[in-house]
């Protein structure tokens, strides 16, 4: 009997993520399959909803729009700051990533987009914001979640949380 994917089941899958130009952004091949708890918003909504009802062994292609993925690019998260904001950093270069804390205490990843003299343009958007995402998915396993996993809202063990 194969379980069809629904809430409170643990799904393990291999996936390949490409952008619309065919560039591979992420690929689980050679790693542990990604495991998530269905219905707990562990993964982006566009992918989660496409997987509902599928079974172990299924392969599918899913195209996810930004609104069902990492959202649109928020222009307010792109800012120009003076070099002094990077105290303690020897050399600020394009492409560098930093973690900063928002006033609400959340960790935000920012990337340096541009360095122009003393002015640094930083971007706090998710790197995949504003992009259509193309997933090639193969479902490796579908199993019942443990009570503890349901309580925590995420998967334990291989491919999941380690605690
Ligand atoms: Zn846990």
Image (cartoon, rainbow, N blue to C red):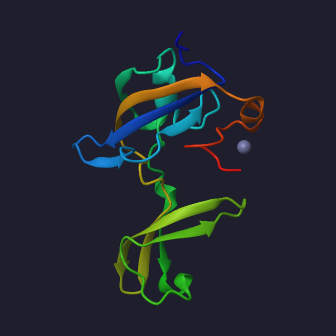
> Viewed as shown, does residue 41 lie left or right of 139?
right
Q: Looking at the picture, tell me which residue is in the foreground, 114 or 96.
A: 96
In the figure, 142 relative to 160: above or below? Answer: above
Q: Where is residue 84 in the image (x, y as percent from the top left)?
A: 53, 87
Q: Residue furthest top?
A: 1
Quadrant where ligand 1 appears: top right
Seen at 53% across and 83% down, the residue is 86
- Quadrant housing residue 15: top left
- Quadrant housing residue 102: bottom right
Q: Position of residue 106 (x, y in %)?
A: 67, 59
Q: Where is residue 155 in the image (x, y as percent from the top left)?
A: 64, 38
Seen at 48% across and 85% down, the residue is 83
Please identify the quadrant where the N terminus is shown: top right
Q: Residue furthest left?
A: 21
The answer to whether residue 147 shows anywhere in this view is: yes
Q: Looking at the picture, tell me which residue is in the foreground, 59 or 90.
A: 59
> Viewed as shown, does residue 154 lie left or right of 79?
right
Seen at 42% across and 81% down, the residue is 119
């Amino acid at each position: 009997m194969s379980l069809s994917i629904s809430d409170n089941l643990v799904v393990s899958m291999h996936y390949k993520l490409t952008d619309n130009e065919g560039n591979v952004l992420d690929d689980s091949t050679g790693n542990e399959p990604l495991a998530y708890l269905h219905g707990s918003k562990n993964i982006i909504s566009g992918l989660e909803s496409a997987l509902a009802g599928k079974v172990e062994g299924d392969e599918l292609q899913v195209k996810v729009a930004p609104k069902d993925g990492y959202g649109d690019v928020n222009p307010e998260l792109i800012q120009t700051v003076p070099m002094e904001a990077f105290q303690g950093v020897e050399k600020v270069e394009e492409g560098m990533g930093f973690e900063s804390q928002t006033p609400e205490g959340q960790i935000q990843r920012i990337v340096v987009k541009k360095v122009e003299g003393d002015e640094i343009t930083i971007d706090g958007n998710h790197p995949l914001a504003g992009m259509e995402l193309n997933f090639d998915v193969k479902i490796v396993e579908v199993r019942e979640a443990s009570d503890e996993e349901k309580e925590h809202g995420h998967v334990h063990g291989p491919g999941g949380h380690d605690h």
